Amino acid sequence: MKKISISDVAKQAGVSKATVSLVLNNKESGIRISEKTRLKVLQAAKDLNYHPNYGARLLSTGRSCVIGVLTVNENMLFVSDYDGRIMRGISAVAHESGYNIMILDEGIINKKTPLGGNLIYGRFLDGILIIGPDFKSKNLIKTIHEIHQNNIPFVYVWRKSADRDAPVVLLDNIQAAQMGVEYLISLGHRRIGYVSLGKDSLSGWERLEGYKRALEKHGLRYDETLVRDDIKISDGASLVNEKNLDKLLNLSNPPTALFVAFDPLAIAILNSLHKRGISVPDDISILGFGNTTMTSFSSPQLTTINEPLEEIGKHSAKLLLNQIVQKNSGDNHKRIVVQTKLIERDSCRTL
């Protein structure tokens, strides 16, 4: 069976091989290609079942049309609702632009194996998207330094867990948390507890700052007894440290509402309260953060702050591809902040 070539696509579309190359490779040039011609070329390629020769493309353009997605735990991409939503956004933009994705585990790069290093520093990858952890990682900082030293385009996705002046697409955790706590205040709550993800959580500390700003703005005193970073259990099905939750609920002046920095933990607390016979929202209101899939199936359905993670993934991929294709140094320090919004459901009530 004859292998379909770029010449066959050009003949089918009635255009030159150069035009086909510009369309299929997303090349920038001084030649303006109309949308009608572009669609004609794409349809011809589809009709002929044309697939580009990536080896030839690498030799002719210097690009592999492969971008890496670097994570500290690649398995989380397949089980985490958070990372999965980011990947949907990345995939949509990458595939639309003719790019493939390779998932890289940060642990592989830092082990004594040439695989990860060769993929990155051998320039097989055109660029890298970095989904960093929610804590400081010395290994990741080391990897980022080496990527930077090798002049490989990269973009932080969702959060900047390593300190470097580099492009990033994220959400404003402080503003989002402040918005959520102000919502609880608008419902009449004055004793509002804050449950974080632990002392090492970067997003947890940012959301705590938003919590404090909301209280200060409305003339409410910050009470450290209402703030807990020890309720989440790292391992285990329940997620909740029941004794530490008791300490919060059994205060002499207990909270009437809880702002929980992580939806799965908020839902775990909902379940714990249900077992205790504590009604949500009649006895206490619960506000989560994330708008994960499970929030609309909890009982009651969880009021939460939406993290637009698919949108973050799309912006990140577009920013990286712009660096690759345009070689646009102006994007090297770009910071894109994606807006959050409150999703009102059934777990909060007016006092």
Image (tube, rainbow, N blue to C red):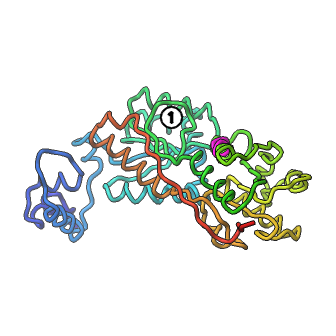
Magenta residues, start to end:
205-210
Q: In the picture provided, is 234 more to the left or to the right than 276?
A: left
Determine whether 289 is above or below 115 in the image. below
Q: In the picture provided, is 270 more to the left or to the right than 306?
A: right
Whether residue 266 is visible here, answered yes or no, is: yes
Residue in the image at 64% along x and 70% along y: 345
Whether residue 242 is visible here, answered yes or no, is: no
Image coords of residue 56 (percent x, y): 24, 47
Q: In the picture provided, is 291 more to the left or to the right than 58?
A: right
Q: Quadrant of the C terminus?
A: bottom right
- Amino acid under label 1? Pro
Quick one: SS at disc 1?
A: helix
Residue in the image at 56% along x and 55% along y: 83
Q: Give whichever of 131, 185 is nearer the camera.
A: 185
Q: Quadrant of the N terminus?
A: bottom left
Q: Which residue is mark 1?
A: 114
Image coords of residue 105 (percent x, y): 55, 44
